[in-house]
Image: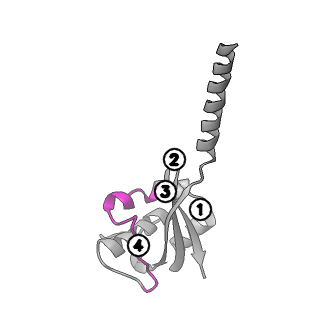
Amino acid sequence: MKHRVIVWLVLFVTCASFAVSSARADEWLESYVAYLSDNDHYNSSGVPLRDAASILAQDRANVHRFNLWDGGDEPDKFFTTTARRQMMSAMLNRGGVSQRTRNTIVKFDMMVLVNIWQGSKGPYVVVELLP
């Protein structure tokens, strides 16, 4: 009987800890607004960028590395290093960004709201188009 109680107790604690860790919500890290201008659609060598992640990363490089701010750009604390900016593609893929939003970023100059989150599989971004 004592052995059965211990087994049930271990199972209960294991299930309870799994439920708590599974239910843990993703953590919001920060948000920023960026104006994605023509400057952000080209890399520092002048080569046109053809995907949303590269354009978003170039915008942050222009802000943090080259001190080239567009009207409407806000600072962030996350993408201050080259290594962090190189994570943009993976972060965008982990986020819930539609193909329509990605295509719009590539084709037009526009304002976006970028939300940075920490999830169980790593940080990710959710990008919203602003009017």
Cα–Cα span, label 4 and label 3 = 15 Å
Q: Earlier in the sequence, mark 1 or mark 2?
A: 1
Q: Which of marks 4 and 2 is nearer the N terminus?
A: 4
Q: Are the residues at dot 1 and dot 3 in contact (C-beta closer than 8 Å)?
A: no
Cα–Cα span, label 2 and label 3 = 10 Å
Amino acid at circle 2: Lys
Q: In which quarter of the image is the N terminus?
A: top right
Q: Are the residues at dot 2 and dot 3 in contact (C-beta closer than 8 Å)?
A: no
Q: For residue 86, which quarter of the picture?
A: bottom left
Q: Give the range drawn in magenta.
A: 71-89
Label 4 SS: helix
> Residue at label 1?
97
Cα–Cα span, label 1 and label 4 = 17 Å
Label 2 SS: loop
Q: In this view, does 80 lie above or below 26?
A: below
Q: Are the residues at dot 4 and dot 3 in contact (C-beta closer than 8 Å)?
A: no
Residue 82 painted magenta: yes
- By secondary structure, the bulk of the magenta-drawn segment is best described as loop
> Residue at label 4?
59
